[in-house]
């Protein structure tokens, strides 16, 4: 039986990451987004009067006011307002096409109780980090929407 | 002050401006540093992750704790350590060295250094070995540094 699960292959901040796809994740193209900065968020999507904030990240994962993003990847995980990551490129990758091995990042956890990269793909010359979607969502939420960049 | 005269097979790892002295039994392999992937939101002593034996392997710059930040060069090596006690059997980690480590059998009493420069947070003791300043890593301290006790498995 064929495994129909996919990873999202995401490219942003000059680096490629994988993230398991799931029902708590939705993808929106740039044209469905409002290019309106809200605090540290670089764009937002308005759904039924609520603002879903989306963040562009730099190589150190600090929020950027803008980036060459093409899509927003929103994660909900039980929250009423999903939070989004802005990515330059996005591809779907069948689970069976990549070899994933567990990984324990060293050092303190970046969000309470969680590391963000619990695994890595080891099929190429360099590993590709696999992001934990709930951890990523927690990190993006920790950036907040009320502190303006450069303010 | 002299240490007990035990015979220990060890490796001297050139790290920053001194050496780390570690029992050979802790080391799984000495590898060439291959393509490194940065690990965002990691502390600066984590240089990145590389592939070793089809596993992701974190590479650390421990020399940063007593010297300037390291740069990876053609002579650099990744000394791959077995997982620390109590950790998962897959949790190998690597320490960057300036050059190929030197194998030593420590037989003669070594001089224990006690000057100010000998004290570092992640070294248990500092020694003079044949005129080389060397430190023995503090495994308990490294384990606390590496693994956040609040992380959910």
Image (cartoon, rainbow, N blue to C red):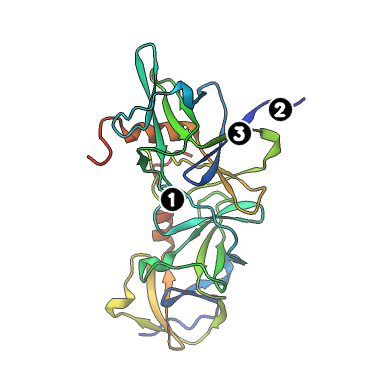
Mark 2 or mark 3: name the one nearer the start of the chain: 2
Which residue does the numbered mark 3 point to in the structure image?
A: A91
Please identify, in this view, whether the residue under mark 3 or under mark 1 is nearer the observer.
Answer: 3
- Report the front residue among A47 and A4: A47
Please identify, in this view, whether the residue under mark 2 or under mark 3 is nearer the observer.
Answer: 3
Please identify, in this view, whether the residue under mark 2 or under mark 1 is nearer the observer.
Answer: 2
Give the numbered dot on residue A3. Answer: 2
* Numbered marks: total: 3
Horizontal and vertical percent position of residue B14: 49, 76
Left or right: A46 in relation to A99: left
Circle 2 Cα neighbour tier, 10 Å, few/some/many (<14 / 14–19 / ≥20): few
Which residue does the numbered mark 1 point to in the structure image?
A: B147
Left or right: A109 in relation to A130: left
Mark 2 falls on what kind of element?
loop
Q: What residue lies at 60% left-to-right and 53% top-to-bottom?
A: A126
Mark 3 falls on what kind of element?
strand
């Amino acid at each position: 039986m064929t495994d129909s699960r996919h990873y999202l292959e995401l490219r942003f901040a000059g680096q490629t990451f994988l993230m398991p796809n799931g029902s708590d994740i939705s993808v929106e193209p740039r044209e469905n987004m409002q290019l309106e900065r809200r605090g540290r968020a670089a764009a937002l999507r308005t759904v039924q009067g609520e603002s879903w904030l989306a963040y562009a990240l730099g190589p150190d994962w600090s929020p950027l006011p803008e980036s060459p993003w093409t899509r927003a990847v929103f994660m909900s995980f039980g929250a009423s307002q999903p939070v989004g990551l802005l990515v330059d490129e996005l591809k779907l990758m069948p689970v069976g096409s990549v070899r994933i091995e567990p990984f324990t990042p060293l050092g303190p956890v970046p969000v309470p109780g969680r590391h963000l990269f619990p695994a890595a793909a080891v099929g190429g010359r360099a590993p590709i980090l696999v992001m934990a979607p709930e951890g990523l969502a927690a990190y993006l939420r920790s950036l907040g929407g009320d502190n303006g960049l450069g303010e | 002050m002299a240490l007990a005269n035990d015979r220990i097979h060890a490796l001297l790892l050139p790290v920053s401006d001194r050496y780390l002295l570690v029992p050979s039994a802790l080391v799984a392999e000495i590898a060439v540093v291959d393509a490194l992937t940065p690990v965002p939101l990691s502390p600066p002593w984590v240089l990145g992750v590389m592939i070793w034996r089809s596993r992701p392997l974190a590479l650390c710059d421990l020399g940063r704790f007593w010297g300037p930040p390291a740069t990876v060069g053609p002579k650099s090596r990744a000394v791959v350590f077995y997982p620390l006690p109590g950790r998962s059997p897959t949790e190998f980690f690597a320490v960057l060295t300036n050059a190929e480590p030197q194998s030593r059998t420590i037989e003669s009493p070594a001089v224990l250094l006690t000057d100010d420069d000998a004290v570092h947070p992640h070294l248990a003791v500092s020694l003079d070995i044949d005129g080389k300043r060397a430190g023995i890593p503090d495994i308990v301290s490294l384990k606390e540094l590496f693994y956040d006790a609040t992380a959910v498995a």
